[in-house]
Image: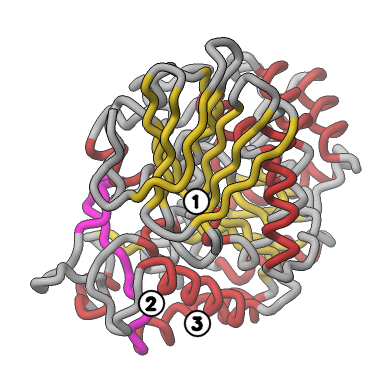
Amino acid sequence: MTLSPGFDVVHELTVSSDGAQVFEHGWQSFSPTSVYPLGTRPHRPTSERNRMLNYRQSSQPGPDGYFSEGVLSVADGAGSVHVVAAADPFTTGVRVQAAVSGSSVVIGADGPVRVTVVPGDDVQAALRSWAVSAASGAGLAAPKPAPTAWCSWYEYWGDVRREDIVENLEAMRTLDLPVDVVQIDDGYSAEIGDWLIPSDGFADLRGLVETIRGEGRRAGIWLAPFFAGARSRLAAEHPDWLLRHPHGGPLHAGHNWNQDLYSVDLSHPAAAEWIRTVFSTFAEWGIDYFKIDFIAAGAIPGSRASGADPVTAYRDGLRLIRDAVGPSAHILGCGAPVLPSVGLVDSIRVSADTGHSFAPEDGDMCSPSQAAAMLSAHGRQFMNGVFFANDPDCLIVGAKVENREAWATHVEQVGGAVVSSDRLLGLDDWGLATTRRLLTR
């Protein structure tokens, strides 16, 4: 195998036939990230829809060889781990590739990198050493711990109603559960992009926020700020705010919620003012926890009003959101370009969505399932408490959840965010005891 066009050789090494491993890092939260025994084929998208929503749209890794976003490492099987990382891993989108031929590994990159050789054979320890050094070099403050939370998604999905939130809010009090944040997930808005227009089940969203805060809890909310659905008022009334093809016309950014999706160009002054208004309005209502989802849409290639490259535009968009909500609010990035989010979010999803079933239905390790969520959370464990608080996705331990004991153990072992997402009054004794134990810090 040879390197792809545009990749220059940056490092070469010889590996042992036994024990050699390669760490491949995915672009965004949902992109598979794992360590592979040398010669094992890495995970790749099984459909174009999955590639559009869950992988880096501008990357085209083949089925053979290894292709990594920002950082790649090779344990040579002879006592060293070779870490090859972008010289500026947070503000650039450098890709690293490894071509294997017998015992020879040639590593290439499409931008400036630094190579570090760490003694030992522990890939996670070598990557953590790199992460600590990278964070120090960027002058990053230690990340804040994530608050405990309850999220509506895995019980109610997009059909959630105000009554469901209130029932669980009251259950937290009667069950004496130490939940800091009550987070309203997808389903409260009329459409994807129309965040301040309520759905039928949330006529008085501001009043619900006041009810949550009146119980002594913090209020949280879900948004996909870089997305506009084709059915949204935003897309219909402001097509000039959407990311464009170089030759003109809105750039298709994926398909979900049974509609086409477009990326909002937050470098457009009017779009920037609009998103500032959305977030500042929620902040004024008393919301101080923001789960911002599918935000890789802000870093796809396209023609932007500012002319900025995708990573710069993405980071500028996150700064805009931070400025609107203030420094004390907690921002959870989800579906997020992982390394470009460092320093701009407080916690980050480090994996695909979990699920009530163990294996992904389509066999793609970016798709909702416990197996996919465990895979990438293990791969990114070295980041926890260094770049941000790792979010392994929600704690779901109801009786209907397959493999619930192992999933609860996984959430606990990650040691980052703990967010319950069951109907609390529906938990059996084991589920309630486990939820209480993991929420208690």
**In which quadrant of the rendered view does residue 204 lie?**
bottom right
Q: Which of marks 3 and 2 is nearer the N terminus?
A: 2
Identify which residue is drawn at 65% across, 66% down: 343
> Which amino acid, mark 1?
Gly
> Which amino acid, mark 3?
Arg
Q: Residues within 10 Å of mark 1 (few under 14, many from 20)?
A: many
Residue 426 visible (yes or no) = no
Q: Position of residue 203 (x, y in %)?
A: 49, 65
Q: Position of residue 40 (x, y in %)?
A: 43, 17
Is 300 drawn above or below residue 13 in the view shown? below
Residue topped by disc 2? 266
Residue topped by disc 3? 276
Whether the residues at callouts 1 and 3 have beta carbons within 8 Å, the answer is no
Residue 86 visible (yes or no) = yes
Q: Which of 185 and 47 is in front in this view?
A: 47
For marks 1 and 2, give the one nearer the viewer: 1
Identify which residue is drawn at 46% across, 60% down: 112
Magenta segment includes 196: no
**In which quadrant of the rendered view does residue 102 lie?**
top left
Q: Where is residue 380 in the image (x, y as percent from the top left)?
A: 62, 39
> Which amino acid, mark 2?
Leu
Distance from disc 1 to disc 2, alpha carbons, whole Å, reads 24 Å
Tag 3, which secondary structure? helix
Over which residues does the magenta segment extend? Answer: 252-269
Residue topped by disc 1? 70
Q: How crowded is mark 2: few (under 14 residues within 10 Å), some or many (20 or more)?
A: many
